[in-house]
Amino acid sequence: MACLTIRNLDEGLKTKLRLRAAEHGCSMEEEVRNLLRQSLLPSALTGNLASRIQQRFASVAIDALPIPPRQEVRTPPNLEE
């Protein structure tokens, strides 16, 4: 395994990373590995397409989405003419 040292990391960025790692219940090092994996290895995504779509739109309030008005069904063309 490779070892990577990051110097001159902004203190605010380090704090956000520490908080994000705490939210996910892992170390900062593990959180950085996960972030790199997610951004550089898209094939390493876990779950199927449906679960990834659900995760992406989990924060959208479905009840707040507008429902478009219904339109009348058009008359089908007469193909015998």
Image (cartoon, grey):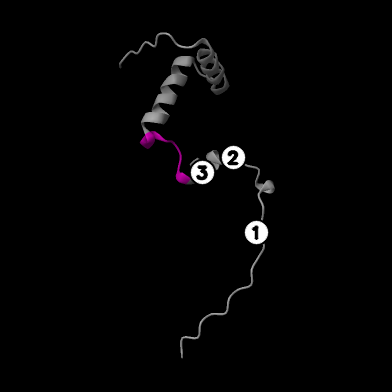
Q: Position of residue 78 (x, y in %)?
A: 50, 86
Q: Circle 1 sits on which residue?
A: 68
Residue 10 image position (x, y, % from top left) = 48, 12
Q: Which residues are magenta?
A: 42-49
Q: Is residue 64 above or below residue 39?
A: below
Q: Are marks 3 and 1 in contact (CB under 8 Å)?
A: no
Tell whether position 36 is magenta: no
Tell me if residue 43 is in the magenta stretch: yes
Disc 1 residue type (three-letter): Pro
Element carrying mark 1: loop
Which residue lies at the image location 44% right of the left edge and 25% below the top edge?
Answer: 35
User: Which residue lies at the image location 51% right of the left edge and 18% below the top edge?
Assistant: 26
Q: CA distance from mark 2 to mark 1?
A: 22 Å
Which label's residue is closer to the chain start, 3 or 2?
Answer: 3
Question: What's under tag 3, amino acid-wise?
Answer: Ile
Residue highlighted by disc 3:
53
Residue type at mark 2: give it: Ala
Residue beneath disc 2: 58
**Which of the marked residues, 2 or 1, is nearer the chain's N terminus?**
2
Kindly state the secondary structure of the residue where label 2 is placed: loop
Q: Residue furthest right?
A: 63
